[in-house]
Amino acid sequence: MKEMRTDRKKTENRSWWIAGVFSFLASAAFLFGARLDSVENVDMRDYSLWAALFALTIIIVGLTRLLWRGMDLLQEKVASERNGSDRGVTYVFKFAKGHDDLLSFLLLLLCWLPVFLAVYPGFFVYDAQDEYVQVATRAFSTHHPLVHVLLLGGIICGVHKLTNSYNLGIACYIILQMLLAAGVFTFLFSFLRKKKVSRTLRILGIAWLGLFPTVVMFTLCSAKDALFTFALLLLLICLFEMGTEETFFTSKGWRLLYVLSGMSMMLFRNNGFYAFLVMIPLLAVSMKKHWRQILILSACAAAGCMLVNGSIKLALHAQDNEYQELLTVPIQQLARTYKYAPEVFSKQDRDILYEILDEEALSLYTPRLSDPVKYRFNNEAFAKDKAKYAGLWLRMGMKKPLIYLNAWWMTSYGFWYPDTVINVYGGNTVFTFTYKDNSYFGYEVEQPGVRESKIPWLDEVYRKLSLEVWKEKVPVVSWLFSPGAMFWFYAFLFTWLLNNKRYEMLYPFLPIFLLWLTVLLGPTYLPRYVLFFWYALPLFLAMVEIK
């Protein structure tokens, strides 16, 4: 009896600790983010900030424990009804028996088709012109993933040669991406059906992926983010299966899918490569029984990625002499220090700084976006003496650590502050418009494409969703569009599973959180960098049902 009481006490203490850590971090995100959003600076010497942090943490701890309990009850209710027939949903929407996958596939395409016609030939934006030009001019660089450059540029150039239409080439690429998206999402819902996830949740998942604007925008967008996220979603499904089914390691199909999805994820985004490499030892340590197979499969995926990338780079003679993408945060930190505390630079330090960032570049510093400064970074000078410039960065950081922290937070807080308004491009003029109060999504069609809407009123709806701020001002609804809010939902779900010791369900969180960490080191905060929060939502919501 005494041992039972001791175990209960340990369990309770553990639960309080998990809730406490989660609540402290969430409270800090809310309070720090609010200050960054309003005054672009967090004053760590502000005692009222720490008092508010203490009070808010206490409030969120209690709320977190209450919500955990509610989710426990919901899971028990769902488990008890698992053998039911979902009659309420069946009468509203009934899948034809044996044709669930086909209907899922067609429904998704049917949802996207009107939007595709409205924004025809599709959203050709976010480096799209640059990638196309590389293929058209045969002058390649590794600034963008070469696999995507060849796929996007190759289709557009090929179709243009046959039809003399750039728009048709862009449309062919978007249609291919729509088909891939429908196929991956159909596989997801087939997987959830085999896991006995309720039809209600699967239908809601189809509605979410078929209709929610953020998903639709990027499914119809030429940026590499969609293909990257499709591959990641397949990898997450593999990790879900790996944790819940011992047969994963005896199935050739699942092992092959793990290798191919991991390799594809790394090919379409460089940060996917870094996140995958870090994930390997964490996964191997977590699953000690199968660590050899995990290492072998992961090594095959990484080797496949390097082989494909290396071969393409060699064949295309692609230039690989850029450092600014990796140095986004240090560049911003030096620029912010130069702007707000120029006196800390000695004459010698100033001369060293000008070698890699001239005065004009430094004058372009904007807190939320590193592009204006980093695009003028002198890669050649940096390559000649990296240690010298690393020493400069370190010296300035030791003198002004709070400026460094705020410089980093200003380009990343949108990924962890739920009430962020995405307006990092405000005032920038692009091909067909000037960003004003919102830059949630690029919307336009870059040259050589031209917007030829077949449904103008629906095109206008997506223009407003992309470029107007109203959706981010509506309580509750705004959080559905917010990268920061989506992150904390995933973090909350993770802590709930951790509190319930559902360790086998936690493996899909590994790449999610590792990728999130990599984007914190990126040039700014945009939904496109964390698209997986929206695409993977049905998979993670299914964890609430599975007991």
Image: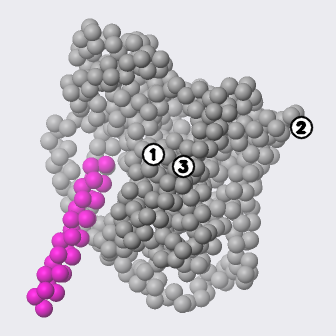
Q: Label 2 amino acid?
A: Thr
Residue beneath the point at 30% across and 66% down: 64
Q: Label 1 amino acid?
A: Tyr
Where residue 335 appears, as percent x and y from the top left, is: 36, 22
SS for tag 3?
Answer: helix
Q: Can you say whether 150 is above or below 502 in the image?
A: above
**Which disc number belongs to residue 163?**
2
**Residue 402 placement, left or right of 320:** left
Between the residue at mark 2 and the residue at mark 1, the CA separation in whole angstroms equals: 40 Å
Q: Which residue is mark 1?
A: 274
Q: Can you say whether 295 is above or below 381 in the image?
A: below
Q: Is residue 22 magenta?
A: yes
Colour setup of the view: one colour
Q: Label 3 amino acid?
A: Ala
Q: Main secondary structure of the magenta part?
A: helix
User: Can the viewer see residue 83?
Assistant: yes
Please tell me which residue lies in front, 161 or 30.
Answer: 161
Where residue 53 appears, as percent x and y from the top left, is: 21, 50
**Which disc number belongs to residue 356?**
none
Q: Residues within 10 Å of mark 2 (few under 14, many from 20)?
A: few
Q: Which residue is mark 3?
A: 303
Where residue 134 appears, as percent x and y from the top left, is: 68, 29
Q: Can you say whether 279 is above or below 520 in the image?
A: below
Tell me which corner region of the image, top left, top right, bottom left or bottom right, holds residue 83.
bottom right
